[in-house]
Image (cartoon, grey):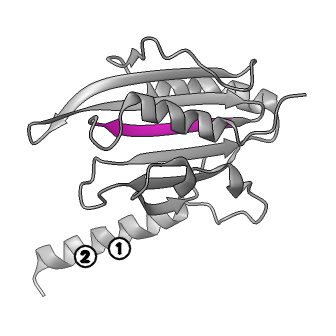
Amino acid sequence: MNANYRRSLLLLLIFMVLSACNMASPPKDFPYELMLSYQDLPPGWERLGGSFPDELGAVSHRVAYSPQPEVSWKAISHQIAIYPDEVSAMAAYPVWEEQWFRPGWQDVPGAESSLQGINDIYRFGYHDGSIDNISFRSYRFLQLHNNMIILILANADNEFLDLDRLLQVIRSLDSKFPLDP
């Protein structure tokens, strides 16, 4: 076994251990029924997996789906982070916004919210990109709903997903939340 191979193997092992340390264990009482599912998407989408990212002060779950899992950029992911209370979630929201909406992201024009929670704070942005001469638009939707922060990441090329369909997905997910009193 040569030195480069051993070093690569050691680095891979360290990465795997560190990745495992950063993932929280699946909570038993997480409201999984609020997560993105096959029913929210057009026919033919496949689940790519799920994880429990460690979000400081929150219990979090993320899922991802794709119509073509072999094409890495054709995907949508949905994450819900549940904070102990609304004050904690409200304090965390600007941190999420700064992390996910870097300079160059533009607000989606004409995509007024139809969220159930009239007091919900949200941001919906896009950024144009391309891979191998294939143009697509990346969307990010960030929502503060009571003590939860919801993040949706999607890439759309108007073939497998477009803005109208993404708005339908967002409304479908939002309809799963109980109405505010």
Q: Quadrant of the N terminus?
A: bottom left
Q: Which residues are magenta?
A: 149-156
Q: Residue at 63% of width from left, 44% of height from top?
A: 80
Q: Secondary structure at mark 1?
A: helix
Q: Which mark is residue 28?
A: none
Compare residues 104 and 168 and report the one nearer the observer: 168
The residue beneath circle 2 is 9
Judge left or right: residue 45 versus residue 80. Answer: left
Compare residues 137 and 3 and report the one nearer the observer: 137
Q: Quadrant of residue 133?
A: top left
Q: Which amino acid type corresponds to the residue marked 2 in the rendered image? A: Leu
Q: Is residue 52 above or below residue 11?
A: above
Q: Is residue 144 above or below residue 79?
A: above
The residue beneath circle 1 is 13
Judge left or right: residue 73 versus residue 5. Answer: right
Q: Position of residue 68 (x, y in %)?
A: 29, 57
Q: Residue at 43% of width from left, 55% of height from top?
A: 43
Camera sees residue 53: no
Question: Rounded to the nearest whole Å, what is the CA distance between mark 1 and mark 2?
Answer: 6 Å
Camera sees residue 108: yes
Whether residue 152 appears in magenta in the rendering, the answer is: yes
**Secondary structure, magenta segment, majority class:** strand
Q: Position of residue 78 (x, y in %)?
A: 53, 45
Q: Position of residue 39 (x, y in %)?
A: 56, 53
